[in-house]
Amino acid sequence: MIPVIKQEATKSGLAAGDKVTIDLTAAGVHHALFLDCRKAAAATMTEAEIENDIGKILIKVDGEPKIEMLASEAIDMWRYYHAKNGAHTIKSVLPIWFTREYFPSLPERQLSGYGMADVRSFTCEIDITAVATLASIQPRSLIEPDNTRKLGKHLCIRRLTDYFAATGVQQIDKKLPFGQPDVGMFAIHFHQGAGAGVFVNVTVKASAGQGVDSDIYPEMVLDLHNQLLQDCGRTIQTGWYHVDFALTNDSAGFLPLGPLTNLRADIEWVTNAPLSFPILCEEFRGLTGPAK
């Protein structure tokens, strides 16, 4: 059994511009964090209301950022992996999973969960952007009662932003992570940002040693790309281009970053890109460390 543990509630009467810090339980093995967001009198919030009132979410282990994304991006990432299980509308609960699948096998669950045996602090910082409806946040964690598991290998989300304001091909060079022996890349999620910018395809290239860049995620028309994602159990989303290196759901299906001397992306914009757009890098860290 993996119980859902109620964490210490955040204060009520939140104000716009506040940064709420939640001290999560540094014990057991954490598999997910659920932020239960409520209006006054514990009334439920819609997905749009959550995205309006909550901005960036930053999860840290011993002060080191592990997961960084906006509330709207967290909902999109949940939908990408989990909406295949059937239609569900987010109501009040903002889900953040530390594993890529709902309940992986025991070996994979032990491999990718956030073990706390060697962790001193585990925190979640939440930026409050507005208080149009938000009145309180109650965090709850899915924790496996195993106090022997160290942090070891664990899933992280690195948030990057880039800029472009033209049509044609944009080269993102020397910005994506590479050359880190303890990191593997499960997926890179490109969002077209706000505004009228629309892309048609993304090509990812890499080089190792003194070699030239070669395609590791080749150019595909968007329809083909979306069909591939659909057939592998992912959820198609307007505005996102999900470069997924682990469509087989293999825990070792990531792209190793250690041997790479560059990792770049070419984005083809058919209309002007926004001035800023996010890139979420879904990483498996701790590859060179012990599993427990």
Image (cartoon, rainbow, N blue to C red):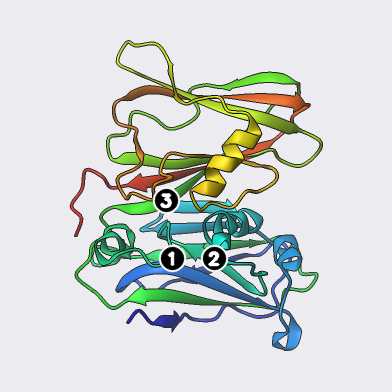
The residue positioned 71% from the left and 80% from the top of the image is 44
The residue positioned 48% from the left and 23% from the top of the image is 174
Other-residue count near label 1 (Cα within 10 Å), few / some / many at <14 / 14–19 / ≥20: some
Relative to 115, 3 lies left or right: right
Q: Which residue is mark 3?
A: 156
For numbered disc 1, what is the local secondary structure?
Answer: loop
Disc 2 to disc 3, C-alpha distance = 23 Å
> Which of the two residues, 77 or 16, is positioned nearer the viewer here?
77
Disc 1 to disc 3, C-alpha distance = 16 Å
Other-residue count near label 3 (Cα within 10 Å), few / some / many at <14 / 14–19 / ≥20: many
Disc 1 to disc 2, C-alpha distance = 10 Å
Q: Of the residues under marks 2 and 3, which one precedes in the sequence?
A: 2
Q: Where is residue 241 drawn, in percent x and y?
A: 60, 39
The residue positioned 53% from the left and 41% from the top of the image is 228
Above or below, comparing residue 228 to residue 79 in the picture: above
User: Does residue 275 show up?
Assistant: no
Q: Which residue is mark 1?
A: 102
Q: Are marks 1 and 2 in contact (CB under 8 Å)?
A: yes
Q: Which residue is mark 2?
A: 85
> Which of the two residues, 272 or 130, is positioned nearer the viewer here?
272
* Foreground tag (1 vs 3): 1
Above or below, comparing residue 123 to residue 269 in the picture: below
The residue type indicated by label 2 comes to Asn
